[in-house]
Amino acid sequence: NAGVTQTPKFQVLKTGQSMTLQCAQDMNHEYMSWYRQDPGMGLRLIHYSVGAGITDQGEVPNGYNVSRSTTEDFPLRLLSAAPSQTSVYFCASRPKIAGGRHEQFFGPGTRLTVL
Amino acid sequence: AQSVTQLGSHVSVSEGALVLLRCNYSSSVPPYLFWYVQYPNQGLQLLLKYTSAATLVKGINGFEAEFKKSETSFHLTKPSAHMSDAAEYFCAVSEDFGNEKLTFGTGTRLTIIP
């Protein structure tokens, strides 16, 4: 199993540009989530999904869109990038059946810089 | 709402010394608690978790943590630090069905002094 994969590893954008961060998992996990990591702030939840066709907002959803058309993929879209979105983005997944007691599996991250 | 507080954003210990990283949580229901480790330029890896079984939880790489409900704490310890333990450590809390989101602390960067 490849686990959770993310592309690209690095990205530089100009203010106002749009892009999609890709996330895929091959573990048949229903629950997937996106976090951003900023110095001194830990990881903050952006959006999450409990299954195909179902998404919900996390703690910091503004400026980001998600969709979940398949169990495997959970892309994160930046509609109009801003310097405040410079961060490291992590995708994670876990089985839904165990609820919050099950650990999440994290991808390697995407480092995004917005100029 | 659930929350996590990690005391000390930076901790330095000598090689061979005790490692103690502090985590306090707030939760309105019995929590599930996790410690994750992040090595430089990598993703997060689970160290250990508490899911209401034994209160003393043993994890990978010689780490362990004790759940203390009366103190709302879940501190991470290792008897003897190794150079390879240098990393950032995150404590996290989640709840059961209905509020399954994982909430992280702000992290503690552990430095090992040779």
Image (spheres, coloured by chain):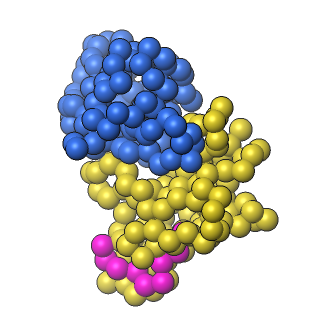
Chain colours: A blue, B yellow
Q: Position of residue A21 (x, y in %)?
A: 28, 25
Quadrant hosting residue A35: top left
| The one of B73 and B29 positioned closer to us in this rendering | B29
A32 sits left or right of A98 in the view: left
Q: Quadrant of the C terminus of chain A?
A: top left
Which region is colored magenta? B76-84
The residue at 33%/19% (across/down) is: A70
Q: Is residue A11 visible?
A: yes
Q: Is residue B89 visible?
A: no
B85 sits left or right of B5 in the view: left
Q: Position of residue A92 (x, y in %)?
A: 39, 38
A3 vs B106: above or below: above
Is residue B5 on the magenta stretch? no
B76 sits left or right of B71 in the view: left
B108 sits left or right of A85 in the view: right
- Residue lying at the far right of the rendered structure: B70
- Total residue callouts: 0
